[in-house]
Image (cartoon, rainbow, N blue to C red):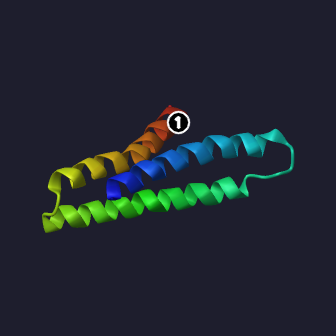
Amino acid sequence: MPLVAAIVGIGLMAWSFTTGIGAALSGSGSGSLAYQVIFIGAAGLVLASLVIAVINLVKGRARALSAVTIAVAFVPIIAVVILAVQANA
């Protein structure tokens, strides 16, 4: 279940980020607050799935699935680090 939550969270983060940028820059006045809230909620979902996967790994339950979930949950974190390094280079 944490793996599904991580994948859904990453998908929601990507969708809300790209759509929110478009809404913020469109100038139509609709705003991007809803997309920001969805992004933060999705980031919380990914973080929660990461915590659950670490707990399952420590307890020895479904080790392979927990390891895959941890790897998937780190994808957005690694992407943000890469983007930050590229922006400052």
The residue that appears at 17% across and 50% down in the rendered structure is: 64
| Quadrant housing residue 25 | top right
Above or below for 10 versus 58: above
Tell me the quarter of the image containing the N terminus: bottom left
Helix, strand or loop status at disc 1:
helix
Horizontal and vertical percent position of residue 4: 37, 52
Q: Amino acid at mark 1?
A: Asn
**Extreme-right residue of the structure:** 28
Q: Position of residue 21 (x, y in %)?
A: 69, 42
Q: Residue at x 63, y 40 (%)?
A: 18
Question: Would you name the residue on which mark 1 appears?
Answer: 88
The answer to whether residue 27 is left or right of residue 43 is right
The residue lying at 38 percent from left, 43 percent from top is 75
Residue 24 at x, y percent in the picture: 75, 46
Q: Using the rendered view, name the quadrant where residue 81 is placed.
A: top left
**Residue at the (56%, 59%) spot, across then down:** 40
At which x and y percent is residue 82? 44, 37
Q: Pointer 1: residues within 10 angstroms few (<14), some, or many (20+)? A: few
Identify the residue at the far left of this view. 60
Q: Nearer the viewer, residue 5 or 25?
A: 5
3 displayed left or right of 45: left
Q: Relative to 9, is 82 above or below?
A: above
**Camera-side residue: 84 or 61?**
61
Where is residue 59, by image quadrant? bottom left
